[in-house]
């Protein structure tokens, strides 16, 4: 689930899946999203064609039900260059789909928790290996899936509303103490 834009580094995702497919022929990648950079999208399609990967890497249009779409997969791959707070991460976690992600600043490390695996930023080989290992280890996927769902609750409306209420109460209390 993405927008096809260079900042998302979908080319790394494709390269990792091509590498992973050499070790596990059952691996496939379903890409959903909107095209925001036609030249980049064309480059991605060429990358898939040149790798002879069209039979296991598929481009789909946008989806209207992100959580249901995430639930069709066993893992989500996240390769963005920078992501302050990626909605895609939360949607995948809420669906119980573990995330394999680059460990970039300000995002995945804080959001994913035990709901996935982090690999060094830009290391396609490590991303590919994490995909192979994650798909091979059903026990890990089940644990990560449960952890993902739990992690996602930290960002649901009731939890965030309670956090705001606590903050407001704390600020009101500070204001009362400073009124003297």
Image: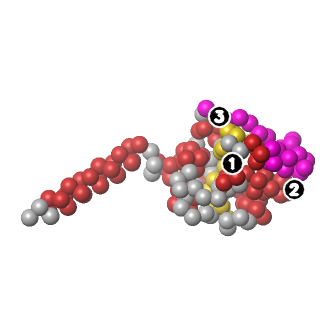
x and y percent of residue 124 in the render? 76, 62
Judge whether 104 appears above or below 147 on screen: below
Q: Quadrant of residue 131?
A: bottom right
- The residue that appears at 59% across and 47% down in the rendered structure is 88
- Going from N to C along the chain, the mark reached first, 1 or 3, is 1
Pick the front one: 57 or 85: 85
Q: Which residues are magenta?
A: 42-64
Q: Which residue is mark 3?
A: 63
**Mark 1 nearby-residue class (10 Å; few <14, some 14–19, many ≥20):** some
Asked if the residue at tag 2 contacts the one at tag 1, i.e. Cβ–Cβ closer than 8 Å, the answer is no
Q: Report helix, strand or loop for mark 3.
A: loop
Name of the residue lying farthest toward the bottom: 120
Name of the residue lying farthest toward the top: 64
**Mark 2 nearby-residue class (10 Å; few <14, some 14–19, many ≥20):** few
Q: How is the image coloured?
A: secondary structure
Kindly report the distance in space between the C-alpha atoms of the residues bearing marks 1 and 2: 27 Å
Q: Is residue 44 magenta?
A: yes
Residue 131 visible in the picture: yes
- The residue that appears at 67% across and 65% down in the rendered structure is 121
Pick the front one: 115 or 155: 155
x and y percent of residue 143 in the render? 60, 54
The label on residue 22 is 2
Q: Which residue is mark 1?
A: 5
The label nearer to you, 2 versus 3, is 3
């Amino acid at each position: 689930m993405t927008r096809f834009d260079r900042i998302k580094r979908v080319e790394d995702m494709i390269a990792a899946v091509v590498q992973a497919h050499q070790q596990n022929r059952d691996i496939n990648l379903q890409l959903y999203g909107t095209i925001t950079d036609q030249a980049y999208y064309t480059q991605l399609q060429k990358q898939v064609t040149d790798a002879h990967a069209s039979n296991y890497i598929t481009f789909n249009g946008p989806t209207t039900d992100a959580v249901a779409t995430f639930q069709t997969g066993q893992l989500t791959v996240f390769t963005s260059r920078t992501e302050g707070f990626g909605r895609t991460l939360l949607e995948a976690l809420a669906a119980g789909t573990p995330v394999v992600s680059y460990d970039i600043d300000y995002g995945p490390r804080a959001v994913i928790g035990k709901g996935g695996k982090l690999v060094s930023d830009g290391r396609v080989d490590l991303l590919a290996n994490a995909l192979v290992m994650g798909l091979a280890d059903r026990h890990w996927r089940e644990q990560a899936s449960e952890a993902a769902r739990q992690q996602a609750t930290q960002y649901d409306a009731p939890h965030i509303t309670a956090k705001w209420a606590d903050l407001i109460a704390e600020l009101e209390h500070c204001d009362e103490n400073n009124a003297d």
